[in-house]
Amino acid sequence: MAVVTDPSQVCLGDRPLIVCDIDEVVLEFLSPLTAFLRSHDYDLLPRSFKLHGNIVSRRDGSEMGKEQFSAFLEMFFENQNLWQTPANRAAETLHALSDDADIIFLTAMPPRHHTIRRNLLDRFGLSFDMIASEEQKGPIVAALHDRRDHPVAFIDDIQRNLLSVAEHVPDCLLINMMASADFKPFAPPPVGSILTASDWDHAGDLMRRHFSAALSNA
Ligand SMILES: [Mg+2]
């Protein structure tokens, strides 16, 4: 399926919409990044909710500098097909949900890595449309949803993205979820109407409940 950069290129059915982040939600990110760093004699230490400052040399414990970190992240995304795998139950849950809802992936990864990510998702049968954009997520979800009467849900691991969608699509179900058990305890507590899903089964239940409540109120 396609990689698009403009929400107007997406064709939705007459049914609920699920917009879903990729890194740490659909694909594991922090665990494979840690394995990748270890293969280069670095480690990612779960000691706060950030990457920079928590990557240290396994030889002398020194912290990786910002420029070097950017270079490593670039290398990781270039080779993501060798490292990243779906989060537990992501594929099964999304396929089950796709019987009754449209699913769109929304990733903030730099556009130069679109093709490799598209191929990786397709390899795991995750062939839903993907929007790759470094713009704020709220306006993108608003453009997709376009104030339709159908319910809409958004899943992401980063509170900033959830708050952006909350601002632009007030009726959207907001679900915070992250794959990494090591970093989860450091995530900021959810604010406002954001719900936290412990895993994909839980997220699936929250969405099904939201959709059936919206349909019975219609
Ligand atoms: Mg993410």
Image: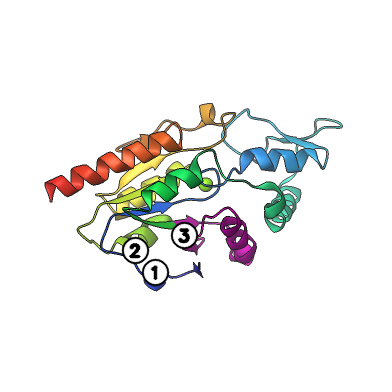
Q: Is residue 140 left or right of residue 208?
A: right
Picture quadrant where residue 204 is located: top left
Residue 194 appears anywhere in the view: no
- Amino acid type for the residue under numbered disc 2: Leu
Mark 2 Cβ inside 8 Å of ligand 1: no
Q: Decide: marks 1, 2 in contact (CB < 8 A)?
A: yes
Which element is circle 1 on? loop
Magenta-colored stretch includes residue 2: no
Where disc 3 sits, the SS reads loop
| Chain part drawn in magenta | 105-134
Residue, x 25% and y 63% (percent of image)?
14
Residue 37 at x, y = what percent? 75, 41
Of residue 18 and residue 138, the one placed in the foreground of this image is 18
Q: Residues within 10 Å of mark 1 (few under 14, many from 20)?
A: some
Q: Is residue 16 left or right of residue 108?
A: left
Q: Earlier in the sequence, mark 1 or mark 2?
A: 1
Circle 3/circle 1 CB separation < 8 Å: no
* Farthest bottom residue in view: 9
Between the residue at mark 1 and the residue at mark 2, the CA separation in whole angstroms equals: 8 Å
Mark seen at residue 128: 3
Q: Is residue 182 above or below residue 216?
A: above
133 in magenta: yes
Residue matched to label 2: 144
Q: Nearer the viewer, residue 141 or 201?
A: 201
Above-or-below relation of 25 to 135: above
List the residue tagged with mark 1. Answer: 10
Residue 48 visible in the picture: yes
Specify the quadrant of the image occupied by residue 87. Answer: top right
Q: Judge: label 3 CB < 8 Å from ligand 1.
A: no
Dot 2: what SS?
Answer: helix
| Mark-to-mark CA distance, 3 and 2 | 15 Å
